[in-house]
Image (cartoon, helix red, strand yellow):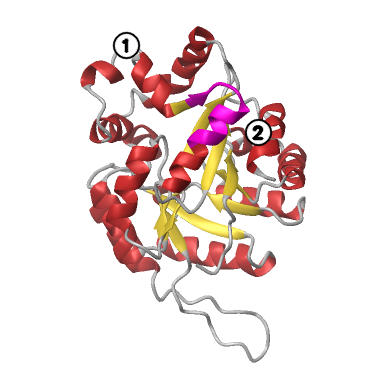
């Protein structure tokens, strides 16, 4: 891959909704701490991801903005390519396109009919390939080479599509054991960049309570439930807010050393990059104090 996102990034749901100046300040602080990339997505009613990227990149200096993810139902393939080229031309080396098929709960309210995720993504990628981007500079030909892209991939069919038609995979809410299986499916030479939720809390009861707050929405989403079952969890694990086993496996909790060890486990399992996500009772809390504490170990 041409875009270097480094080894340790941050995944931030709050960045989807933070006011522009606050989002840029958040990214600046992350790069000061040594994080090399910031991932965020887009949802119903949140900031559009390409315009959000331009604001964050304008207010920071080095950090790479990773779209995690741009929803393929939110724009056609031509617009995705031209938007990506525009951001990359404005901030060379600082934008990575991540694409996702999203979830029925996020798609049907837009007026689309969600279905056949892998086939839909395959067609979308094919439509993207060869889309021209005409530079306004004299003497420069239109760019037609495919843009770099990684895909949100949870289970084998989408991971295989990453291998065939993308530059890597960005799994979400997965364990180091799943990372090892995804690397085997993906093969060498493709980016594998999982997300890891964490909580700097050493009390097991409190950590699991907050973990269940975080997991509540995801456990009601079909794609995530299927992913967890593929990872080896049972129907009992994903019922009633999630078992202790599930919470402990998905949320890295404890002191800084415990969280860093979980991140290292992903890297040892074949990840090239891990994005850490601070969680709390408030899903829109940016979590800077937690990132500051963790940076002392992860970003040295």
User: Counting other residues with Cα less than 10 Å from the Cα at mark 1, is it few (<14), some (14-19), or many (20 or more)?
Assistant: few
Give above or below for 223 relative to 187. Answer: above
Left or right: residue 71 compared with residue 82: left
The residue under the point 59% across, 47% down is 8
Instruction: Name the image quarter holding the C terminus.
Output: top right
Q: Is residue 55 above or below residue 256?
A: below
Q: Residues within 10 Å of mark 2 (few under 14, many from 20)?
A: many
Q: Nearer the viewer, residue 54 or 224?
A: 224
Q: Which residues are magenta?
A: 252-262
Q: Is residue 255 magenta?
A: yes
Whether the residues at callouts 1 and 2 have beta carbons within 8 Å, the answer is no
Residue 104 position in % (x across, y down): 32, 36
Q: Magenta part mainly helix, strand or loop?
A: helix
Near-viewer residue (30 or 286): 30
The secondary element bearing badge 1 is classed as loop
Q: Residue at x 30, y 31 (%)?
A: 228
Q: Is residue 107 above or below residue 200?
A: below
Which corner quadrant of the image does residue 299 belong to?
Answer: top right
Residue toward you, 233 or 203: 203
Instruction: Give the Cα separation between the discs numbered 1 and 2.
Output: 31 Å
Q: Which residue is mark 2?
A: 294
Q: Quadrant of residue 18?
A: top right
Give x and y (percent) for residue 24: 74, 44
SS assignment at label 2: helix
Q: Nearer the viewer, mark 1 or mark 2?
A: 2
Number of numbered markers: 2
Residue 289 coordinates in the image, percent (x, y):
72, 27
Would you place residue 267 above or below residue 127 in this image?
above
Please give the residue where the numbered disc 1 appears in the rendered image.
240
Camera sees residue 194: no
Q: Can see residue 56? A: yes
In the image, residue 262 lies at what x, y percent?
49, 34
């Amino acid at each position: 891959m041409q875009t270097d996102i480094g080894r340790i990034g941050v995944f931030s749901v709050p960045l989807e909704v933070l006011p522009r100046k606050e989002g840029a300040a958040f990214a600046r602080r992350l790069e000061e701490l040594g994080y090399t990339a910031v991932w965020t997505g887009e949802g119903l009613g949140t900031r559009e991801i390409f315009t959000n990227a331009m604001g964050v990149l304008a207010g920071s200096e080095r950090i790479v903005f990773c779209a995690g993810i741009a929803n393929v139902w939110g724009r056609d393939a031509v617009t995705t390519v031209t938007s990506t080229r525009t951001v990359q031309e404005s901030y060379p080396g600082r934008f990575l396109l991540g694409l996702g098929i999203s979830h029925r709960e996020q798609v049907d309210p837009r007026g689309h009919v969600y279905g056949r995720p892998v086939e839909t993504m395959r067609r979308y990628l094919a439509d993207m390939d060869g889309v021209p981007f005409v530079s306004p500079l004299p003497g420069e030909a239109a760019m037609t080479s495919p843009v770099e892209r990684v895909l949100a991939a949870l289970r084998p069919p989408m991971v295989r599509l990453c291998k065939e038609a993308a530059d890597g995979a960005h799994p979400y809410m997965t364990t180091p054991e799943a990372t090892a299986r995804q690397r085997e499916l993906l093969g060498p030479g493709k980016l594998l960049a999982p997300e890891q939720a964490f909580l700097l809390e050493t009390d097991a009861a409190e950590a699991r309570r907050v973990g269940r707050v975080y997991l509540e929405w995801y456990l009601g989403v079909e794609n995530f439930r299927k992913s967890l079952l593929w990872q080896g969890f049972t129907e009992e694990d994903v019922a009633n807010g999630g078992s202790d086993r599930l919470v402990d496996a998905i949320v890295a909790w404890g002191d800084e050393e415990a969280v860093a060890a979980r991140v290292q486990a992903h890297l040892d399992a074949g990840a090239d990059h891990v994005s850490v996500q601070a969680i709390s009772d408030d899903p829109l809390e940016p979590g800077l104090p937690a990132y500051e504490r963790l940076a002392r170990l992860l970003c040295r």
